[in-house]
Image (tube, rainbow, N blue to C red):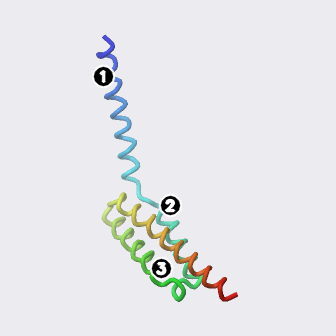
């Protein structure tokens, strides 16, 4: 008796979890893209093109890969690249600030 009640409940629970996961995967990474762009702009303003060019280049490459994935509607890949772009841009920003502080 318990098995006949539990099985439909577990199936329903699994289905709801599957739908929730699918919904997260199909939404464009709008916030992540915005965060990446803002971090890249901040790094550029801090002089990363001269002080941390490798990190800035990597950030821009990830941003472009995110844009490409977004255009292909590969939102999970786009989100991953956007997060990496932001991370590398923040690395560039930190390096730029450290180098600026060393000269001051």
Quarter of the rendering occupied by the C terminus:
bottom right
Q: Residue furthest right?
A: 104
The CA span between labels 2 and 1 is: 38 Å
Cα separation, mark 3 vs mark 1, equals 53 Å
Q: Residue at x 39, y 76 (%)?
A: 61
Horizontal arrangement in the rendering, residue 93 relative to residue 24 (left or right)? right
For the residue carrying disc 2, how many other residues have a C-alpha within 10 Å: few (<14), some (14-19), or many (20+)? few
- Name the residue: 50% across, 60% down: 31
Relative to 34, is 5 above or below? above
* In front: label 3 or label 1: 3
Q: Give percent across and percent down for residue 36.
A: 49, 69
Q: Which residue is mark 2?
A: 31
Instruction: Tell me the residue at 58%/81% (across/down).
Output: 96
Residue 84 drawn above or below residue 53: above
Return the disc, 2 or 1, that comes first in the chain's sequence.
1
Q: State the image coordinates of residue 19 (x, y, percent, origin top left).
A: 36, 40
Q: Is residue 90 left or right of residue 77?
A: right
Would you name the residue on which mark 1 appears? 7
Disc 3 marks which residue? 56
SS for dot 1 = helix
Nearest to the eye among marks 2 and 1: give it.
1
Q: Which mark is residue 19?
A: none
User: Looking at the rendering, in which quadrant would you find the N terminus?
Assistant: top left
């Amino acid at each position: 008796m318990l098995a006949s009640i539990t099985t439909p409940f577990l199936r329903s629970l699994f289905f709801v979890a599957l739908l929730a996961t699918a919904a997260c995967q199909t939404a464009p990474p709008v916030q992540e893209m915005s965060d990446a762009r803002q971090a890249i702009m901040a790094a550029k303003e801090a002089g990363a093109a001269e002080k941390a060019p490798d990190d800035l280049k990597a950030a821009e490459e990830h941003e472009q890969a995110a844009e490409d994935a977004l255009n292909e509607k590969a939102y999970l890949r786009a989100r991953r690249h956007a997060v990496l772009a932001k991370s590398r841009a923040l690395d560039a920003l930190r390096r730029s600030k450290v180098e600026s502080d060393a000269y001051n």
